[in-house]
Image (cartoon, coloured by chain):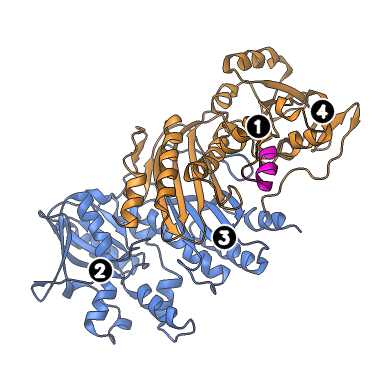
Chain colours: A orange, B blue
Amino acid sequence: MTEFELIQQCFSSWPVTNPALMLDQGDDCLIWQTPQPLAISIDTAVEGRHFPEWASGAQAAQRAFLPALSDLAAMGATPAFFTLALTLPSPLNETWLMDFSARLQQLASDQQMVLAGGDTTSGPVPVISIQVHGTVQQPLKRSAAIAGDDVWISGYTGLAAAAIQALLQDRHADIPDAWQQAYWQPQPRIALGQVLVGKAHAAIDISDGLWADLAHIARASQVHIELEAERLPMHASLEGLPQSEALKLILTGGDDYELAFTAAEEQRDAISLLSQQLGLPLTRIGQARAGDAEVSVMHNGKPMTLDHQGFEHF
Amino acid sequence: MTEFELIQQCFSSWPVTNPALMLDQGDDCLIWQTPQPLAISIDTAVEGRHFPEWASGAQAAQRAFLPALSDLAAMGATPAFFTLALTLPSPLNETWLMDFSARLQQLASDQQMVLAGGDTTSGPVPVISIQVHGTVQQPLKRSAAIAGDDVWISGYTGLAAAAIQALLQDRHADIPDAWQQAYWQPQPRIALGQVLVGKAHAAIDISDGLWADLAHIARASQVHIELEAERLPMHASLEGLPQSEALKLILTGGDDYELAFTAAEEQRDAISLLSQQLGLPLTRIGQARAGDAEVSVMHNGKPMTLDHQGFEHF
């Protein structure tokens, strides 16, 4: 089998289909048609930057696919299909490729997503770009927060960043399962995003850190966001750390892919009910108000400062 | 200015807009809505593979954007918007980046295309993935050729491959303008693709070589395609080469992005008229018929054989 045939075999004949996909792999373009608005996002994962050189194909698939999927969650969209632009070193590492494609197929099937097109090229290191597409009638925009809104976060932040710190020092580090899980298998909050449509105003997924990502909502909505440090949910696995270190992880650690969102005060009961129904902690951590379009964090009644407000992508 | 700010500045505030784009850059997803089917294709260009290390930013933009655009031409689609996943070495080569983005903006404006989203990452060499999106009511599918169809080609093939051969030996090689142009600035046949809707049956763009790409139509349509070597259009700049070398370039040279298409015999006059209206040679080079789903080339009444049938992407 040639490399070309192996790649073809790895990425074709996946079982999921979608009736709105009038044409998929095997023509110059795929063709998609629905009357509903289409939410679209592209994300790239580069070896050595978004996952370590020693990651398995399956781990690389998770680190590439799940963050991309999370952008659909942040809009409240229903996943439909994705495309894959895959650059791999030549000669091919066949074991890695088969592990990658098998895991990708599983992740996509979990979401009923079709791999509808792509391109494969060779280059010095693995570079994986995934573009996700989903339908959404009323997208949750970053610009829709209103002064007076509560600010909420799903789950826990800071766990993926804690994992990265430990794994950078020693890939065999004995770290809590929750950290491993947060870094290697983040859980895009697709179900939450969908039920928030009509209840929440603005939403964003936490890829660069809670503070930095909420600042995007503050700027896009022209509101001030004030967080209360005492309200920030702290996962049990961070409780052994010095408080200032734990707070820094929670506020600036990226890669968790939880959803932060804003909603009117009247929605508090409805959101608590959602939390129960989804079995997912939803914590009220602050408020949006009129004022400078930025984020402040109050701790013991005083504003906190931090060394930096999250990661820049470059 | 930080690298992040420079990148933001290079790719935002471009002038083209589209009313069907309900949301573009600056949220978790872009949102697109039209009742028309959407044609979508993603293409990756890797430095050292799709363009040489010494290419300028503008040249890299051309080699990345124009082949992607060509996939819309092959469906008969009207370009609408694109996304850009850009991996660049750090520290940034700012001159290269500004040259790249300025040229990309120009190319996109030529097509009234919006840069609607993207991702920027760092990696060892430039890797540029571009996903193009266009609207099309009746796509020209590879699978739509019918036994009895004429087979046509636009313009000339083999010129880009001739350029590559020469440039690989010496980047300052004194080669014909037509070869330079074919390699660095291929002309996606957008206008042709659009007017072929309703007149042609199947279409494909020539990225891997005329022979190999027509074989895709043969397989998808389950027809045999027979080309007549004497009919193949030979550009004046190839006439100095030995005939067998010129024929090999024409039949197997990739990267020209001309359109090959099939149409019923009754369309011959209409297609000749299109050729005049577009100022673009359209040449009838063979026929589709019942038989093995492959391509044969007749030369002096005998079938030709070639060393290989085009490039594999890997």
SS of the residue under disc 3: helix
Q: Which residue is mark 3?
A: B105
Work out which residue is located at the far left of the displayed protein and give it: B301
Chain designation of label 1: A
The residue under the point 49% across, 43% down is A61
Q: Decide which of tag 1 and tag 4 comes sooner along the chain.
A: 1
Chain designation of label 3: B
Q: Are marks 3 and 4 on the same chain?
A: no
SS of the residue under disc 4: helix
Q: Are marks 3 and 1 on the same chain?
A: no
Name which residue type carries label 3: Gln
The residue under the point 52% across, 45% down is A60
Q: How far apart are the alpha carbons under marks 3 and 2?
A: 38 Å
| Pick the front one: B296 or A146 | B296
Image quarter of the C terminus of chain A: bottom right
Q: Which residue is mark 1?
A: A176
**Relative side of B208 to B127, left or right:** left
Residue B276 coordinates in the image, percent (x, y): 29, 68
Chain designation of label 4: A
Q: Which residue is mark 4?
A: A229
Q: How far apart are the alpha carbons under marks 1 and 2?
A: 55 Å
Q: Can residue B231 be seen here?
A: yes
Residue A271 coordinates in the image, percent (x, y): 65, 17
Chain designation of label 2: B
Name which residue type carries label 4: Ala
Q: Which mark is residue A160?
A: none
